[in-house]
């Protein structure tokens, strides 16, 4: 029993130590954001890496999300509820919940892991130390641009994702359930509110912060060579996806009253 309590105590102390270091790290990174705009081409490069190169995978995930949602709703509503409510439900769900969270989950695996492994490799090969020796701030030139790029591009990708998700939902409803264009989009417009889109974009912004901050923190603090890079990448993806799921629930509770 004592060993169990001791192990639990070590785990809790380690967790709290990591949380405190993370908060201090994020504070330092936020202080470096104004300086990052003087070197904005680095941010633009990261925006291209985070956003443009992620468009194909986001399109595929969004199309599948809308299609699956539409099929399930049409199947459940058949002969009981007018099919115009399929458009309403697809529009609401992909706008407020599904597309923001699934886009973020995809990018947590793609961008978060890539960003962390890149920074982790720089850490274990002493490239970050070289920046410090040259009098250059890694927070200003490496970390802040990644944070800025991610929180800008993920909401933009989410807008694309929502549009493609609704189109995918309509395609499935039209092909397999004979739902007309006018009926489907009448349902989409029927209960639409501007706040629905705003909620989805607010969530995407927060998810972008989660992904980039975890990737920068774990990557920057990587040790122990290649094995350490693997551990940091795993920690980034796990922490990012967990925070996205929990954060999605908390934000829905706060924003959808």
Image (tube, helix red, strand yellow):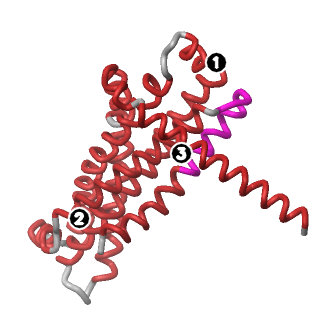
User: In whole angstroms, how far apart are the C-alphas of marks 2 and 3?
Assistant: 31 Å
Q: Quadrant of residue 37?
A: top left
Residue at left offset 33%, top offset 81%: 76
Q: Give whichever of 213, 23 is nearer the camera.
A: 23
Disc number for residue 126: 1
Residue at left offset 37%, top offset 22%: 42
- Percent across and percent down for residue 108 are 48, 46
- Percent across and percent down for residue 2 are 90, 65
Disc number for residue 159: none
> Which element carries disc 1, helix, strand or loop?
loop
What residue is pinned by disc 3? 23
Dot in front, 1 or 3: 3
What residue is pinned by disc 2? 196
User: In whole angstroms, how far apart are the C-alphas of marks 1 and 3?
Assistant: 24 Å
Q: Quadrant of the N terminus?
A: bottom right
Q: Earlier in the sequence, mark 1 or mark 3?
A: 3
Q: Which residues are magenta?
A: 222-239
Q: Earlier in the sequence, mark 2 or mark 3?
A: 3
- Left/right of residue 144 with respect to residue 241 in the rendered view: left
Instruction: Confirm whether the magenta stretch covers residue 232.
Output: yes
> Which element carries disc 3, helix, strand or loop?
helix
Q: Give whichever of 99, 174 is nearer the camera.
A: 99
Residue at left offset 25%, top offset 48%: 160
């Amino acid at each position: 029993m004592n060993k169990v309590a001791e192990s639990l105590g070590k785990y809790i102390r380690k967790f709290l130590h990591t949380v405190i270091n993370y908060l201090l790290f994020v504070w330092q990174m936020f202080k470096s954001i104004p300086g990052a705009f003087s070197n904005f081409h680095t941010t633009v490069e990261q925006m291209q890496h985070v956003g443009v190169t992620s468009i194909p995978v986001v399109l595929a995930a969004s199309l599948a999300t809308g299609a699956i949602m539409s099929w399930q709703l049409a199947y459940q509503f058949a002969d009981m509820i007018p099919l115009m409510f399929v458009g309403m439900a697809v529009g609401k769900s992909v706008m407020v919940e599904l597309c923001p969270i699934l886009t973020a989950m995809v990018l947590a695996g793609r961008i978060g892991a890539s960003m962390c492994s890149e920074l982790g490799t720089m850490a274990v090969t002493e490239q970050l130390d070289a920046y410090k020796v040259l009098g250059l701030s890694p927070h200003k030139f490496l970390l802040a641009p990644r944070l800025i790029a991610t929180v800008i591009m993920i909401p933009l990708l989410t807008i694309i994702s929502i549009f493609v998700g609704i189109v995918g939902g309509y395609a499935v409803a039209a092909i397999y359930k004979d739902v007309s264009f006018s009926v489907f989009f009448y349902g989409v417009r029927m209960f639409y509110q501007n706040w629905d889109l705003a909620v989805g974009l607010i969530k995407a912004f927060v998810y972008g912060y989660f992904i980039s901050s975890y990737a920068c923190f774990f990557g920057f603090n990587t040790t122990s060579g290649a094995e350490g890079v693997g551990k940091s990448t795993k920690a980034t993806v796990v922490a990012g996806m967990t925070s996205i799921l929990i954060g999605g629930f908390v934000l829905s509770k706060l924003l959808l009253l």
